[in-house]
Image (tube, rainbow, N blue to C red):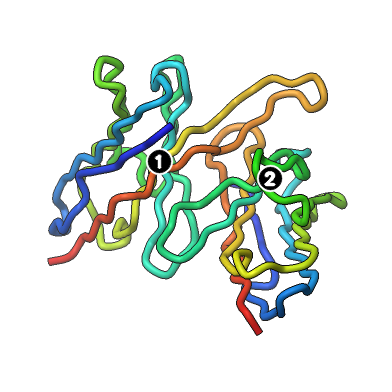
Amino acid sequence: VQLVESGGGLIQPGGSLRLSCAVSGLTVSSNNMSWVRQAPGRGLEWVSVIYTGDSSDYADAVRGRFIISRDNSKNTVYLQMASLRAEDTAVYFCARHYVEEVEWFGELRYTDVWGKGTAVTVSS
Amino acid sequence: DIQMTQSPSSLSASIGDTVTITCRASQSIGGFLNWYQQRPGKAPKLLMFAVSALQSGVPARFSGYVSGTDFFLTISGLQPEDFATYYCQQTYSSPPWTFGQGTRVEIK
């Protein structure tokens, strides 16, 4: 399984950028796919998820500005980012949010496959 | 949103030591607690899910347990490759699935 992010770079405040996550070894339409970011020297921050049923969810910090989507024919997940701010500067990781119903626990939920990340810098 | 508070933020230890990292949830999250390891410049790696279930390939020196809303990650017999930053994450109910702020384990 491999997740390869691309599309990062330097962008001015207020600008837009689209990140891509090309996936091999698993089918994006059959998996919940997430974006997690990490600002320089900071911890991990969950950003967004797209579910197998096409619904999605967002962190409050990005809701209304970011849109997650996928192209099943390309097996690729996207994060369209608009109205970018300095605080959006981070490495953005694409990841699989795994969900499985098991008898001994119920519904397991964890992020088990990660890409290497793509860096986004918002600065003038 | 559920807040996850990790402690300590960093610790120094020697090879062979046993260390424990704590993660406290701001409310009950059942057993929906996962642990990740991140080495510098690398992506996070899943260590453990559902409090104490080891991900495939993770050594048995890693263990986890819970007491109420306090979750613990113990590394018994630190190895050189264990020096990294560790994060807890809750996946209880709906997003956001918040992470703790991380605990950096350094070589003494």
Classify A39 as above or below A99.
Answer: below
Q: How many marks?
A: 2
Left or right: where does residue A113 sit relative to residue A118?
Answer: right
- Letter of the chain that mark 2 sits on in the rendering: B
Q: Nearer the viewer, mark 2 or mark 1?
A: 2
In percent of width and height, residue A122 lies at 21, 60
Q: Check disc 1 and report its element: helix, strand or loop.
A: strand
* Chain designation of label 1: A
Quarter of the picture holding the C terminus of chain A: bottom left
Q: Is A68 in front, or is B103? A: B103
How many other residues sit within 10 Å of disc 1, few (<14), some (14-19) or many (≥20)?
many
| Residue nearest the viewer, comparing A28 with A86 | A28
Q: Which residue is mark 1?
A: A35
**Which residue lies under the disc numbered 2?**
B48
Q: Residues within 10 Å of mark 2 (few under 14, many from 20)?
A: many
Which residue is rendered at x = 36% and y = 40% of the image?
A63
Front in this rendered view, residue A40 or B47:
B47
Q: Is residue A62 above or below residue A96?
A: below
Disc 2 from disc 1: Cα separation:
20 Å
- At a point 39% along the width and 35% down the height, the residue shown is A2
Q: Residue at x 78, y 44 (%)?
A: B52
Quadrant housing the N terminus of chain A: top left
Percent from the top left, x then y, of residue A67? 30, 33
Please say if A56 is above or below B5. above
Name which quarter of the figure residue A119 lies in: bottom left
